[in-house]
Image: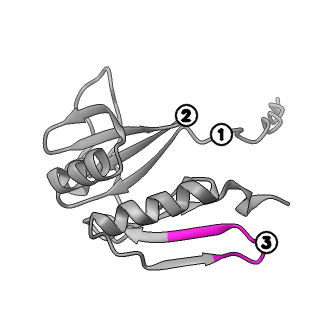
Amino acid sequence: MTMPHPSRPNPPGAALEAALYVDDLPAAEHFYGTILGLDTVARVEGRHVFYRVGDTILLIFDPAATRIGSDNAQLPVPGHGAMGQGHFCFAAEAAEITAWRDWLETAEIPIEADFHWPNGARSIYFRDPAGNSLEFAEPRLWDG
């Protein structure tokens, strides 16, 4: 007897979490918690620190610790990790981007790029202490 194939569900409607990997959690904690002012959701010494960004959770992991899967049967998270620099973009309106640029420059965080996309949306790019590429962009970047 042939089993019918299930139909594909609707595409996902939102991102719940995104991950970046760093080799220095204390430096990342200072950067994301103090410089960017994100609220800490969870923290495990030597493994991770998680932050709330609107409805999304930004997961900051030490890849050496997360390559090893969980041995907790209640939380069987498989091993994962990435090598190299990642990217994360924060949504911000034009005036907020200007304020962030001023704040980051005051904090001696270099701005790598500040430009308007073909549709007029503005982005600024900068790096966290691990070299991950971070961006503030107007949400209209993806309109149309």
- Percent across and percent down for residue 30 are 21, 50
Q: Which residue is mark 2?
A: 55
Give the vertical position of 50 relative to 129 (above or below). Answer: above
Q: Which residue is mark 1?
A: 14
Q: Is residue 31 magenta?
A: no
Marks 2 and 1, the one that precedes in the sequence: 1
Specify whether 134 is left or right of 8.
Answer: left
Q: Nearer the viewer, residue 17 or 114?
A: 114
Estimate the spatial distance between the alpha carbons at disc 3 and disc 2, rounded to whole Å.
26 Å
Instruction: Check contact, mark 2 vs mark 1: CB within 8 A.
Output: yes
Q: Which residue is mark 3?
A: 119
Marks 1 and 3, the one that precedes in the sequence: 1
Give the vertical position of 81 relative to 56 (above or below). Answer: below
Q: Which residue is at a point 27% across and 70% down the rendered structure image? A: 108
Give the vertical position of 56 relative to 125 (above or below). Answer: above
Q: Where on the picture, by quarter, is residue 126?
A: bottom left
Q: Which amino acid type is shown beneath numbered disc 1?
A: Ala
- Percent across and percent down for residue 118 are 76, 78
Instruction: Check contact, mark 1 vs mark 3: CB within 8 A.
Output: no
- Percent across and percent down for residue 92 are 58, 53
Q: Secondary structure at mark 2?
A: loop
Please identify the quadrant where the C terminus is shown.
bottom right
Highlighted range, magenta:
116-124
Estimate the spatial distance between the alpha carbons at disc 2 and disc 1, rounded to whole Å.
9 Å
Q: Which residue is at a point 53% across and 36% down the rendered structure image? A: 54
Q: Which amino acid type is shown beneath numbered disc 2?
A: Asp
Label 2 or label 1, whichever lies nearer to me, is: 2
Estimate the spatial distance between the alpha carbons at disc 1 and disc 3, rounded to whole Å.
23 Å
Marks 3 and 2, the one that precedes in the sequence: 2
Q: Which mark is residue 29?
A: none
Query: In the rendered image, is residue 83 in sight?
Result: no
